[in-house]
Image (cartoon, rainbow, N blue to C red):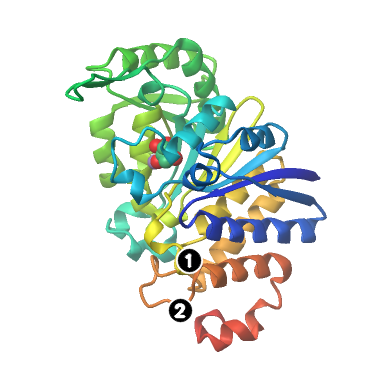
């Protein structure tokens, strides 16, 4: 397969983790005979710095003319500390999601046996957890009318949804459930919000087309608690844009680090793959950022294009790195491995798994656990 991929590595640790994702994808290309052609473009704070806009036309055009997009991270503390800034890096990502119609954000959550101790949640609670958040990505409070009065003493963000937006993501969620444990949990606040009541009605209708899938409902406040006290109960969590944003960060605690969490943003025509973590500016250039979320986003990309064996290979390589303790400091405080070494291990494993155990670089780094 030939794929042209736009690489929007963005800000902070974005470029360094995306580089590792490119390495993994390149390795897959070599082993399975695919050609992946990468083209870089600016987005976020770096784009504002270079062009004055968080999403330059050139970047958007490139995305419209490629098969898929690999995204890094955006943001910069200088904007975080300045609520009055009119142009902000995040606007680039939000505009991109909207312009490309990326309406579904898919975030897999899983407890890795080797990393149970990295999570503050008890092992007995975590064991066997494996669910996927389906977050609506083009609507809700993120995109409703925004307003601040002239004095700056009043502000509002409108939360809006229409039937069609809910129907589209619901079908994807139910289809995914059919291939899993056949359960969809709709998370909302239907005891208070009109939009949530609309979600319940529409999702209940869609569910009729999937009689083999059980539909359950949970209020967001209860769901936030259930994710911590009994995460195993979930299979597919379907929810709106804002609730999905919050719940997926919360759920990352299950895996042990947000640095492991990948995501796919899917539309009718376009697709974008990104880690769910942010730009982590303090870590930029220090070779400490965990590249696994970015690399697992590559697994999602491959799966999206029907390259299932290739996708599984990337996941196996990541799991090998984890069981071999070739992880960054977020997962092992005294780890000697950085972003590059973890990325190298994973792409080397993809390229040549048999020889890896004897690779002298790793042995020299003292990782006797690998052998
Ligand atoms: C995410 C991020 C974004 C969001 C930000 C950077 C706008 O937190 O992808 O989860 O809120 O959607
Ligand atoms: Mn988020």
Q: Compared to 64, does 45 lie above or below?
A: below
The reply to whether residue 247 is in sight is yes
Density class for disc 2 (Cα within 10 Å; few <14, some 14-19, many ≥20) is: some
Return the residue at label 1. Answer: 285
Q: Nearer the viewer, residue 261 or 52?
A: 52
Ligand 1 image-quadrant field = top left
Q: Label 1's element?
A: loop
Task: Residue at 80% x, 51% y: name it.
Answer: 35
Which quarter of the figure is the C terminus placed in?
bottom right
Return the residue at label 2. Answer: 336
Label count reads 2
Nearest-to-viewer mark from 2 and 1 = 1
Q: Compared to 212, does 38 lie above or below?
A: below
Q: Position of residue 30 (x, y in %)?
A: 79, 60
Q: Is residue 298 left or right of residue 117?
A: right
Density class for disc 1 (Cα within 10 Å; few <14, some 14-19, many ≥20) is: few
Q: Position of residue 333 (x, y in %)?
A: 35, 73
Task: Residue at 45% x, 34% y: name it.
Answer: 91
Q: Nearer the viewer, residue 128 or 316?
A: 316
Q: Are marks 2 and 1 in contact (CB under 8 Å)?
A: no
Q: Position of residue 40 (x, y in %)?
A: 65, 48
Q: Nearer the viewer, residue 321 or 212?
A: 321
Q: Position of residue 267 (x, y in %)?
A: 60, 28
């Amino acid at each position: 397969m030939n794929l042209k991929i736009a690489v929007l590595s963005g800000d902070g640790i974005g470029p360094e983790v995306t580089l590792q994702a490119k390495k993994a994808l390149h390795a897959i290309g070599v082993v399975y005979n695919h050609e992946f052609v990468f083209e870089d473009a600016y987005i976020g704070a770096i784009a504002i710095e270079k062009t004055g806009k968080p999403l330059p036309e050139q970047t958007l055009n490139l995305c419209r003319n490629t098969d898929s997009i690999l995204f890094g991270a955006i943001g910069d503390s200088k904007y975080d500390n300045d609520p009055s800034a009119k142009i902000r890096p995040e606007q680039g990502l939000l505009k991109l999601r909207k312009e490309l119609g990326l309406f579904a954000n898919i975030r897999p959550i899983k407890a890795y046996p080797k990393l149970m101790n990295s999570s503050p949640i008890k092992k007995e609670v975590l064991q066997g957890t494996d669910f996927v958040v389906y977050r609506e990505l083009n609507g809700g409070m993120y995109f409703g009318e925004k307003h601040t009065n002239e004095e700056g003493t009043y502000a509002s963000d409108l939360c809006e949804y229409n039937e069609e937006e809910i129907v589209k993501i619901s079908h994807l969620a139910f289809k995914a459930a059919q291939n899993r444990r056949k359960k969809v949990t709709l998370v909302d606040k239907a005891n208070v919000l009109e939009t949530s009541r609309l979600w319940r009605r529409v999702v209940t209708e869609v569910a009729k087309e999937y009689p083999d899938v059980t539909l359950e409902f949970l209020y967001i406040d209860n769901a936030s608690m259930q994710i911590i006290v009994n995460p195993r109960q979930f299979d597919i969590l379907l929810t709106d844009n804002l609730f999905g944003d919050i719940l997926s960060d919360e759920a990352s605690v299950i895996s042990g680090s947000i640095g492991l969490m990948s995501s796919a943003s899917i539309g009718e025509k376009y697709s974008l793959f990104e880690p769910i973590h942010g730009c982590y500016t303090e870590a930029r250039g220090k070779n400490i950022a965990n590249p696994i979320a970015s690399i697992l986003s590559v697994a999602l990309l491959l799966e999206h294009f029907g390259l299932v064996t290739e996708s599984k290979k990337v996941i196996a390589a990541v799991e090998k790195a984890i069981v071999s303790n070739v992880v960054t400091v977020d997962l092992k405080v005294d780890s000697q491995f950085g972003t590059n070494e973890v990325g190298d291990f994973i792409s080397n494993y993809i390229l040549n798994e048999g020889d890896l155990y004897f690779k002298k670089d790793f042995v020299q780094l003292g990782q006797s656990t690998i052998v």
